[in-house]
Image: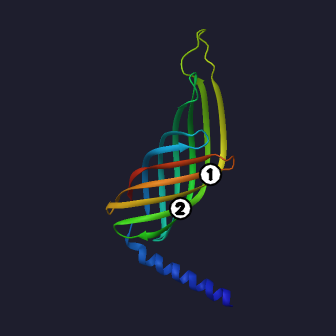
Amino acid sequence: MKASAITLSIVFCLLSLSAIGQSYPKNSLKVGFGTAYLNSGDYFGRHRYIEYQRSFIPLLGLGLNAGMSDANKNLNDLQKISTRAYQGEANLYLAPIHNRVNSLKLGFGGVYRKAEDLIEPISPSADGLENVVRDETSEFGYSALLEYELYIAKHLTMGTRASYQQFKSGNKVFYWGLNAGFRF
């Protein structure tokens, strides 16, 4: 009896919050660009992504993200490594600050990443043969992020996002960048 009363109270509070939040756009679509740091190889690269976010109540939302990263690094005087990674992410957002001007979101969720490492010579060998090594990995992990958004107009947004990803293999990836989008 006591548990059902508590559950009913929580549901009532959530419904009240969602009724208050009907005046703002609940969906957003954003494009972001930034820097990627791959801890597994200690090198930097570029990161691009597109994200759809849905707010259920002003303080809680869900984000679906698809992104691509490129990074290059010289291993020694003879070889370089190039990494290209594609990923998909699903995050649950908590927005402790959310008003008509801006929002601060904390996110946590799961991530899937497929990466291809290409190790090749810096310059072609004397005999003209290229010694190229390809290594493909697919891995699951989790992500944690912090995002700040500024609402330029009712339907336009721009912001910044920092993200940390930890994979089961031990690889870590850090992202930081800027984004812009629209709300509807």
Q: Please give the label number shown on residue 69.
A: none
Element at label 2:
strand
Which x, y percent locates residue 92? Answer: 55, 63
Q: CA distance from mark 2 to mark 1?
A: 14 Å
The furthest residue to the front: 77
Residue visible at 44% across and 45% down in the picture: 34
Q: Which quadrant would the N terminus be assigned to in this image?
A: bottom right
- Residue occupying image coordinates x 34% and y 62%: 151
Q: Which percent across, then down, holds residue 120?
A: 59, 24
Q: Position of residue 61 (x, y in %)?
A: 51, 65
Image vertical order of residue 126 relative to residue 101, above or below? above
- Packing grade of label 2 (10 A; few <14, some 14-19, many >=20) is many
On the image, the x and y values in percent for residue 12 come to 53, 83
Q: At x 39% / y 60%, what residue is drawn?
A: 149
Residue that lies at the very extreme toward the top in this rendered image: 127
Residue 106 or residue 122, whichever sits in front: 122
Left or right, 4 with respect to 161, comes to right
Answer with left or right where residue 181 lies relative to residue 162: left
Q: Is residue 184 visible?
A: no
Dot 1: within a 10 Å radius of its alpha carbon, few (fewer than 14), some, or many (20 or more) residues? some
Amino acid carrying mark 1 in the image: Gln
Give the answer, above or below, for where 180 lies relative to 103: above
Q: Are marks 2 and 1 in contact (CB under 8 Å)?
A: no
Q: Which is more N-terminal, label 1 or label 2?
A: 2
Badge 2 amino acid? Gly
Q: Which residue is mark 2?
A: 107
Q: Nearer the viewer, mark 2 or mark 1?
A: 1
| Residue for badge 1 | 166
